[in-house]
Amino acid sequence: MQHFYFDHNATTPVSPAVLASMSECLAEVYGNASSIHYFGQAAKQRLETARRQVSAMLQCQPKEIAFTSGGTEADNLAILGTVRHSRRSTKHVITTAIEHPAVLNTCTQLEREGVVVAYLPVGASGVIDPDDVRRAIRSDTVLVTIMHANNEIGTIQPLAEISKITREAGVLFHSDGVQAPGRLDLDMKSLGVDLYSLSAHKFHGPKGTGALFVRDHTPISAVMFGGHHERERRPGTENVPGAVALGTAATSIGELPTANLRDRLESGILQNIPNVEVNAARSERLANTTNICFRGIEGEALVIALDLKGYAVSSGSACSSGAVEPSHVLTAIGLSAEDARSSIRFSLGRRNTAEQVDGLINAVSESVAHLRRIAPRAFYVHA
Ligand SMILES: *Cc1c(COP(=O)(O)O)cnc(C)c1O
């Protein structure tokens, strides 16, 4: 059976160019980038080339890039590093209800450390109102952290407008940009952010490598302790092949995608299946992402049914302690727990074709009809 991948917001395949550059580096360049001899300098050179490539993608300075082990670490470093650095007696942080767990759970950690965190609601649009940010800022606000594009529903946040407000208020602004490379413009100057997180595996690089953009002169402390690497921001012997892979991925993002295939998928599903709704349909969204509620269906069951037909998709729900928790993003945009559990995310990538999309539409139609037939809605009402 052939298998087709429609889960690119979870991770992407490593591109041939990334694989070639990374394996060459892994095989040939084994020096420690901190060593002063030939081997060390060869590694250092690769590291700095990669830093320039990443900074070119973000249109920032190379020294403003700190390599990390991925998006989660970049988010932790941005949030913990800036807030802990502040010497204020009281500290306040503003974020949103729809952030990735890498941001939300870091904010929860800050609350344990005595920081007050405001979780802004997004409403049905899944988009933050900049005026809500303005109103939430207090005299002791240290940081605003708002993602660029949402991984589950694809909604895009108005970073440039929000950064005008944070600038004026003298508050630092971090954005989790993990879903943005290859999908949105990434000019750090026009977005106006002070910190911006990246993860290679979301744009055709390998897992376990990423970066944090830290605007020059942004006050930040390290959150791990060790050597003087990465301008005192992130200790540990540099993962040179990982940085090289990230650099190559950054040079290969190409043209921004159109929404053609995503729209073909959405309209195919809407035309063929009754009682479905596209979540946050009217908001500005990533061109590759759609999140659809199939009423009366358990999302997990649909994911499994599609997997058996060769299609990989994802449900936003997380299975914790045996119970399927509804997605915090979908409930934040106003879905009932039941509708949230009935929703599926499809995220397209460069290699998906119109034929694959048509096959997926058929597979979804058959699976939904089957699941609705064998399990009446009442079966799924949990409480
Ligand atoms: C995947 C993802 C992360 C985590 O990145 P890792 O490199 O997997 O740790 C953080 N934020 C968003 C929005 C993501 O999609």
Image (cartoon, rainbow, N blue to C red):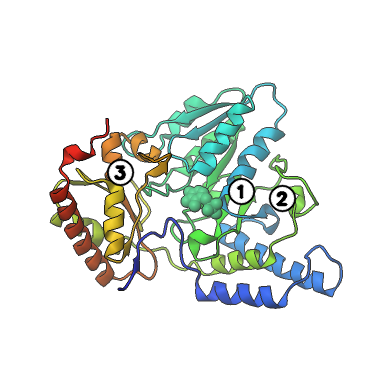
Q: Residue at x 71, y 39 (%)?
A: 219
Tag 1: amino acid: Glu
The mark that comes first in sequence, 2 or 3, is 2
Kind of residue at badge 3 = Ala
Q: Are marks 1 and 2 in contact (CB under 8 Å)?
A: yes
In which quadrant of the rendered view does residue 332 lie? top left
Q: Which residue is mark 3?
A: 280
Pick the residue in front: 113 or 281: 113
Left or right: 331, with 134 as reference point? left
Residue bearing the label numbered 2:
234
Q: Secondary structure at mark 1?
A: helix
- Ligand 1 within 8 Å of disc 3? The answer is no
State the residue position of label 1: 73
Answer whether labels 2 and 3 touch (C-beta < 8 Å). no
Q: Secondary structure at mark 3?
A: loop
Question: Which one is earlier in the sequence, the residue at label 1 or at label 2?
Answer: 1
Instruction: Identify the image quadrant of the C terminus.
Output: top left
Question: Based on the displayed image, in which of its 4 quarters is residue 323 positioned?
Answer: top left
